[in-house]
Every structure is written in C-alpha cells, then in structure tokens.
Image: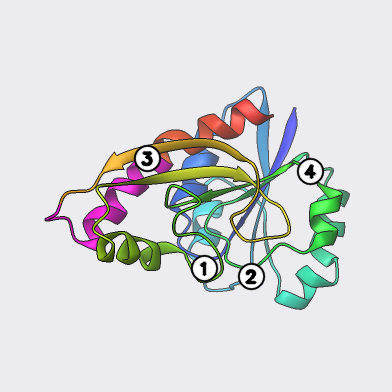
Amino acid sequence: MKKIAILASGSGSNAEKIMEYFQDSEKAQIVLVASNKKEAYVLERAKKFSVPTFIFNRSDLEEGLLTRMLSGLEVDFVVLAGFLLKIPQGLIKAFPERIVNIHPALLPKYGGKGMYGMYVHQAVKNASDSETGITIHLVNENYDEGKVIFQAGVEVLETDTPEDIANKVHALEHKYFPNVIESLL
C-alpha cells in the first residue's frame, strides 16, 4: 500500500477529489494533508475523510521539518494540490521524481512564480487564447518546469470570463488528477 501526502494552501477541491478517489483503494492511502495556511479550507476537507493534518510555516519547509515528517511517516509520494510555496531542494532530493503538481494551464504557457489560480485564467483571457487546460508535472527546483506527465485541453470561447475558464479547468483537474496520480504509483 503506497502512502500519499497532499500539500495544499487553499480551498482544497483537488485534494478532496484525491481523498475521495483513494478512500477505498487497495493501492494507496492518503496519510497526511499538510498546509502552510492554518485557515486553509483543505484542512476541513481532510477531516471529512479522517485524514490527519499538519500546519507548517515557510521556515518549517525550508529547514526540513516537513521533509523529516514525511520521511517519518514513510510517505511514498507527495502531491501538490494548490500549494503555492516553492519546494526546497531538500524535499526534492528526499522524494526524487515522487512529487507531482497540477498547473491550471498548458505549460509552458502561463507558468512560473505568481502564476496560479485566477492570475492564470485572467492571463489566458487577456491573451485571447482559444484553448487552455491543465498540466500535471513532476516537481523540480523551478516553478512549473518539471517533466510533463499529462496535459488535457479545453476550448476557450471569446465570451468566456476568467471565472468561466476557471470552471472549465477545475472540471479537467477533478476528472484527471486522481487517475494520473494512481498511474504514477
């Protein structure tokens, strides 16, 4: 049985879909949801699934406390689901090619520091792109530059607002992210 930890900074809708997906799995279980924000709604979502939670700060991340905790729990795979802090080299080395992230655009477009959530969808709208989507990728030392594992696209209409684009992208995230995670285990 593989052990998965989820790192999230916000609402946690992707994290919830992942917890739901693996709830009765014989292949993997979610052993921890960790957040750098004590008010993140993802922590409430974890309670619904009886998944332990952990709140940490930037220095806990950078100084290796989170890495030691994940290693102590014998975590096999780390999932970033709306996690906004840069992953330090120590965590990447502890989990080589075993940290995956989802990005709400078709990378390499609209990636990098500060490109998350509605900022991405607004950029897609401002550029009048006819397509956007999701990218699931391995995490390396640079924002949104790790090896691409999976991409799925969706049409963007001229009449779509950034909120409409966000809804279309969330549908793709919820549909594909849990399955892709399972395929990587």
Nearer-N-terminus badge (3/4): 4
- The CA distance from mark 3 to mark 2 is 25 Å
Image quarter where the C terminus lies is top right
Q: Amino acid at mark 3?
A: Leu
Front residue (pair 47, 32):
32
Give the distance between the C-alpha atoms of the residues marked 4 and 1, in whole angstroms: 22 Å
Out of 71 and 147, give the one closest to the viewer. 147
* Residue marked by disc 4: 75
Cα distance, mark 1 to mark 2? 8 Å
Residue furthest to the top in view is: 26
- Ranked by sequence position, the earlier of labels 3 and 2 is 2
Residue annotated with mark 2: 36
Residue in the image at 19% along x and 61% along y? 161
Q: Where does label 3 land, which residue?
A: 172
Question: Could you tell me how far apart the alpha carbons at marks 3 and 4 are, in whole angstroms?
Answer: 26 Å
Badge 4 marks a residue whose secondary structure is loop
